[in-house]
Image (cartoon, grey):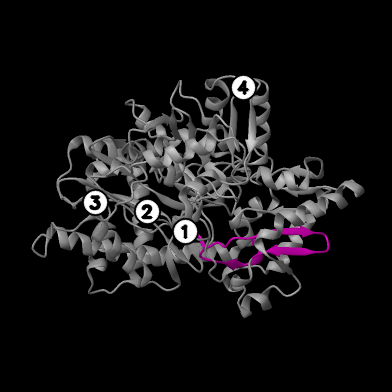
Amino acid sequence: MVTPVNTSDRLKQLRELMSSNKYNIGAYVVPSEDAHQSEYVAACDERRPFISGFDGSAGCAVVTADQASMFTDGRYFLQARQQMDDNWTLMKWGIAGVPSWQEYVTDHLPAGTRVGIDPTLITAEQGAKLREALQAKSGDLVAISENLVDVVWGSARPVRPEDPAFVLDVKYAGETHTAKIARVREQLERDNVRGLVVTALDELAWLFNLRGSDIDFNPVFFAYAVVTNDTVTLYMNEAKLTDAVRKHLDGILVQPYESIFGELSAMSVGLAESEGRLLVGKTASWALVEALGESNVKVDSSPIVLLKALKNATELAGMRKCHERDGAAMANYFGWLENELLHNGGNLKLSECDVADKLETLRREQDLCVGLSFSTISSVGANGAIIHYSPQRGSESLLDTSKMYLCDSGGQYLDGTTDVTRTYHFGEPTRWERECFTRVLKGHIALDMAVFPNGTSGFVLDPLARLPLWEIGLDFRHGTGHGVGSFLNVHEGPQGVGVRKHYADVGFRPGMTITNEPGYYQDGDFGIRIENTCVVVKTDTKFDYTNGNGYLTFEPVTMVPIQKKLILNELFTDRERQWLNAYHQTVWDRVSGRLDKSGLGYEWLKRETAPM
């Protein structure tokens, strides 16, 4: 049972600061993100979890004198409700009639309200829109450089990580950092801008072929960079510079991390005099754009976003190979787990945390494994309905052969990043569980088999994964797919598959990666998700209506069997059965040779990949 954090004292201190003469604000916004708009943040930047108790990866807190509201999406409705105490009201993003946090502060607070926010934690575009909307109602958005949650947190707040960065060998990256910088400069010349300010941590890691460990599960480091047509400056603290990194960065000026805002302010003078502009990505903070001066910047998508998304041949080869090794770890895991639960005396004292730890151990035994790509979602029964559930020691559940088991996990390897979800039942599933599983699998297969014109967006393809659920009035409250980095963040854009309109902004191109992960979640009972990581590849068609643009499809690189026992045969078509048999044959061909033939994993894989 999850025990909510008591936030009464924390909110009391925050409200005292808000009402003080120094700040005099009627509301304070606490976003999830850090100064780089990271989805996952370091412990020192977990301000929203600290003030609210809710630690999901997405959400925004708004605190007024008499109300504390938490805005989050459907992945976290159950989790937020369990983790927050009675001081908080859950605002369910995406539900009809529920405002976004931006709509809430502009339309639901009294006219004239001054709303405070740390300007490093909101994008320039968000800041400008919100300020305009508030000023139209005689209010204002107040940039408060001293983060008020940090003041409440005090000396207990963790320090910012300063672990050394390390060089990612070109044999894994597939391209030198100097070649990448040259490609960025070509794009800047086409865009007619003087340079690019790089703020997103995964963009920095990709551009410089460096990796770090400043954020759990994400091999990134805290830095900024400015790339012009003749200079490159990397703003990264001295503690991160090993001799190998210094040598790697030869010819690149390195300055202290905290000096970026002063440097940009100084730069703004020269830009104004020459009427030049710097490009800043859409995730750049309000504070950063203010330092440069709005007239000196062009806010647009960073060219690195798409360059990084289009994997080169080396990265694609690494993605396939790391998933084979990951598949071997998963086979050993499920072979072990099944043996523990059904044989070996029936070990029914294994907890969700116990088995997650076992999976991590087996993953780390694989070549080139650096660690996990996110905290393992090891969930039994009702916990599986909490979409991003993460078991905690002391409150986790024991495995139960009468209940569904959902395992969403991934690894970070020097040659790639993995993300896979499988749902298994180690006993006798009910007919309803089998029907739900089968409909999720049908959606998964429909999306995987899709053939579509080059440039088609994930918004267009998303219904394929939902139609079998829609047929009986079911659905799932999360996106169907996200991009995956190459030994980088497990969630990567700009591509994705989902119902939100931003999924229509970017079309698929060969070399992109995407997950295929439909699900169904029955509150208080079970969760089902089937996830493969895929590569977008060209495919041949009998005709070509695109006049040479071509057609694409998905190639699954995840190599883990899908449980046949959970399939309701009467709902499964011959074509779907052929797909599953072909997929399982590929899994066997690519993974079996990596397993000990006398081991539990080998026998499990052999049985689970046998044709239907």
The image quadrant that residue 26 belongs to is: top right
Q: Is residue 319 above or below residue 73?
A: below
- 180 or 579, nearer to the observer: 180
**Mark 3, mark 2: which one is toward the viewer?**
3
Quadrant where the N terminus lies?
top left
Q: Is residue 122 visible?
A: yes
**CB-based contact (under 8 Å), mark 4 and mark 1:** no
Residue at the spot of label 1: 158
**CB-based contact (under 8 Å), mark 4 and mark 3:** no
Q: Where does the image place residue 397, in percent across and percent down from the top left?
A: 21, 50
| Label 2 or label 1, whichever comes before in sequence order | 1
Which circle marks residue 396 in the picture? 3
- For the residue marked with disc 2, what is the amino acid? Ala
Other residues around mark 3 within 10 Å, as few (<14) / some (14–19) / many (≥20): some
**Mark 2, mark 4: which one is toward the viewer?**
4
- For the residue marked with disc 4, what is the amino acid? Gly
Which circle marks residue 112 in the picture? 4
The span from disc 3 to disc 1 (Cα, nearest Å) is 26 Å
As drawn, the residue found furthest toward the right would be 274
Residue 506 drawn in magenta: no
| Label 3 or label 2, whichever comes before in sequence order | 3
| Tag 3 secondary structure | loop
- For the residue marked with disc 3, what is the amino acid? Glu
Q: Where does the image place residue 86, in percent across and percent down from the top left?
A: 33, 33
**Mark 3, mark 1: which one is toward the viewer?**
1
| Tag 1 secondary structure | loop
| Label 2 or label 4, whichever comes before in sequence order | 4
Q: Is residue 186 above or below residue 549?
A: below
**Residue drawn where x is 53% and y is 31% of the image:** 27
